Amino acid sequence: MMVTVESTGVLERRMRVELPAERIDSEVESRLKSMRRTTKLKGFRPGKVPANVVKKRFGSRIRQEVLSDLMQKSYAEAVAQENLNPAGGPTIVTEPGTDDKAFAYVATFEVLPEVTLKGLDKITVEQPDVEITDADCDEMIENLRQQKGAWKEVERASEEGDRVIVDFDGTLKGDLIDGGKGREVPVVLGQGQMLPDFEKALVGVKAGDEKMFKVKFPKDFSAGELAGNKVDFASKVHRVEEQELPVLDDEFATLYGVSEGGLKQLRKDVFDNMEREVKQKVRQDTKEQVMQGLLDGNPMEVPKALIEQETHTMQDEAMQQLGIKDRDKAPPQENFSESAEKRVRLGLLLRQYIQDNALTVDTDKVRARVEDMCGGYENASEMVASYLRNPQLIAQIEPVVLEEQAVDLLIENGVEKVKKVDFKKYMNR
């Protein structure tokens, strides 16, 4: 087998493979001989069909099968022989035969880039140090309390925190604006549900009031024709409601599934959940910083084949999330191409880093990951045990854990800065 390789791009390779006639003929003869033992043809006893008859009848088909099989086999052999790492399947074109002594084809494909990681010690990570105070926990419990509140109609004028049920029509220069008509819309004053001028105008109104007011739209408003303009609103108030909140006691705790320990246990559960959410967000934020540092320090070409494959995967993920089954209605692939390239590049860089540092999956970290995933459920211990007994689920978690181990090592070997951050600002930013 003769193999020649030339570079036709940064990552594209053109490989010509020539197979000697002896190898082809030998395989053809072997298959014809094997076929002769079982071939049944009219006028001949089974297994007694003359070789020349079998060759005349089946030779052409057998030769095509042999060539197809040898192309696949020889391609793999040639790639190994030339120490190439294809990034995807090849495009193969057979050469027209000049004689019966050889068979040649040309395979065009991309190879994986050779990665030499740089600047790892310069990756800077700002590690948020988030303190959860009693006041933060109180506010979270108050949010839970408001979720269980009931709205009661009142006859007084509306105040901040009340809910106003209102009809409205918004017009600009006499024309109804897009989305500017509402009927019996509940607006909680002070929650920022509507633009500030709109909510401000509804403070002090009573049931049955009809009121005209202007609302200034911000200059960066998404609907360009409204940006920076004042819109006229005509409104009619149906009713004003105030919220009645449940008493914070042990009975309130049962509304959130706490059967023992009452309000004290609910507070502990809330605090634990806040800690988990902070931990997850800090982890995600630091990971993003590491990934960006890795990308910034290691620009490189990536195979188009891998980008196309990842783009297709991301499109499928989007279709699944949006509940789209008809591919004709799927978001365009170009929407994902930039993110797909970033994913591919990160994947190649992380894979190289894991190889360079001989990282293997830490089983204790796998268990810890599973415990984190199940921590918010009542039957957490049962779920953990169930996960750990499921090889398929563990096989999905292990690559994630290995990536986290790589991120931890990058942080350890990079530059880490710790910054104290307010819980509320951090979680709401």
Image (cartoon, helix red, strand yellow):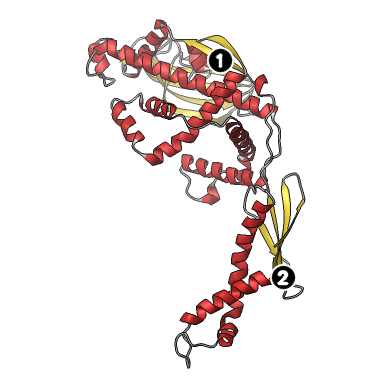
Q: Earlier in the sequence, mark 1 or mark 2?
A: 2
CB contact under 8 Å: marks 1 and 2: no
Give coordinates of residue 190: x percent, y percent.
46, 13
Whether 320 is drawn above or below 228: the answer is below
Q: Quadrant of residue 336?
A: top right
**Which residue is located at x 32 percent, y 35 percent?**
386
Secondary structure at badge 1 equals strand
| Front-most of residues 391 and 172 | 391
Q: CA distance from mark 1 to mark 2?
A: 64 Å
Q: Which numbered marker is on residue 127?
A: 1
Q: Residues within 10 Å of mark 2 (few under 14, many from 20)?
A: some
User: Residue pushed farthest top?
Assistant: 134
Whether 300 is drawn above or below 149: the answer is below
Give coordinates of residue 305: x percent, y percent.
64, 47
Give coordinates of residue 193: x percent, y percent.
48, 20
Q: Residues within 10 Å of mark 1 (few under 14, many from 20)?
A: some
Q: What amino acid type is highlighted by mark number 1?
A: Gln
Query: Can you see residue 33?
Result: yes
Query: Can you see residue 244?
Result: no
Q: What amino acid type is highlighted by mark number 2?
A: Ala
**Which residue is located at x 72 percent, y 76 percent?**
100
Q: Quadrant of residue 133?
A: top left
User: Mark 2 — residue?
Assistant: 102
Picture quarter with the C terminus: top right
| Front-most of residues 423 and 42 | 42
Secondary structure at badge 2 equals strand
User: Residue pushed farthest bottom?
Assistant: 43
